[in-house]
Image: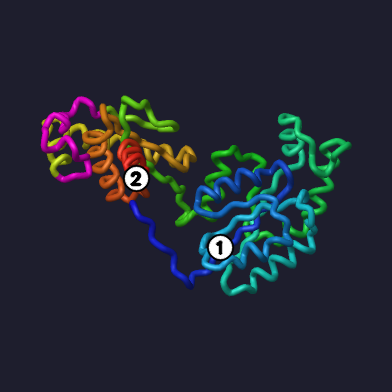
Amino acid sequence: MISQTPSTDHAPRRLVLVTGPSGAGRSSALNVLEDAGFEAIDNLPLRLLPALLDRPGDAQSVALGIDARNRDFSTEVVLELMGRLSAEPGWSAELLYLDCAPDVLLQRFSETRRRHPLAPADRPADGIAREQELLHAIRARADVLIDTTTLNVHELRAEVEQWFAPGGQRHLTVSVQSFSYKRGLPRGVDVVHDCRFLRNPYWVPELRSGNGRDAAVAAHVAGDKRYTDFADKVLDLSLLLLPAYREEGKSHISIAFGCTGGQHRSVAMAEDHALRLAEQGWQVSIRHRELDRQHREGSKP
């Protein structure tokens, strides 16, 4: 859908504390939670957490990464914090623990040549052993435990989404935009469709000053005998690609439509495509690069 549904005022906010030994995938899990709509914060000092949670008018769920590198980290503090949060009526608190076999953790540190945070001058194996001993009681308290020993990054994403993404589904947002070829391709776009073969309203005097959001301009573009087949095939392509991109773990896809001036044909196609994707249940945002530029320049004093 193009517009998001607001959350209810009385629904408890989700708070997920993400922890586990260094190298087990905590940062990757936080990235997945951020893609799923959580506000993700890594290594926030625990003493600052009450101020974060007491922000008025904020309904977004929070994912907080904590580990032994936190300045005020201790097993007792984390367990006490989980106990307090579980009693808070406005919050639904969960502890996600990313675990991994020591030999695989050692292999990961060897491959990346990173220093273990608990073994500044020692062997990584010593730091791994210290950290697992330190986290033992927290591991036992975990609401969700994911063993990443044999998981690749895509399998880890799927595991985290199964527990924490809405409905257990991967979240993918789609950005649709129009642009002018005279000003070059937009940055970071994934898929580009060239609309310059469609008939151009620019050459119709009464349509020239309009844009593709105007009904008359859109009708003129849609009147091209090739328009329907083009629009249908572009939609079929998007409906084929979007689920595949989502399964691959992408969280955002940008689809662009271009024409000569970025005012008529590309705008009409982008508007039509965004609406049809939204009708298929996709979350879609839309922007028109050239129209936005004209608006900015027109509003200057």
Considering the numbered disc 1 on the image, is that residue within a helix, a strand or a loop?
strand
> Label 2: few (<14), some or many (≥20) within 10 Å?
few
Callout in the foreground (1, 2):
2
Task: Give the image location of residue 42, x and y in percent.
Answer: 66, 50
Query: What amino acid type is highlighted by mark number 2?
Result: Ser
Q: Is 202 located above or below residue 101 in the figure?
A: above
Q: Nearer the viewer, residue 241 or 148?
A: 241
Task: Give the image location of residue 102, x and y in percent.
Answer: 76, 41
List the residue tagged with mark 2. 299
Q: Which residues are magenta?
A: 195-215
- Main SS of the magenta part reads loop
Instruction: Locate residue 257 relative to residue 69 in the image: left or right.
Output: left
Considering the numbered disc 2 on the image, is that residue within a helix, a strand or a loop?
loop
User: Residue 49 has which mark?
Assistant: none
Instruction: Locate residue 193 relative to residue 129 in the image: left or right.
Output: left
- Residue 207 visible within the image: yes
Q: Nearer the viewer, residue 86 or 255?
A: 255
Is 298 one of the magenta-colored residues? Answer: no
- At horizontal 38% and vertical 60% (from top left) the residue drawn is 5
Task: Give the image location of residue 269, x and y in percent.
Answer: 24, 37
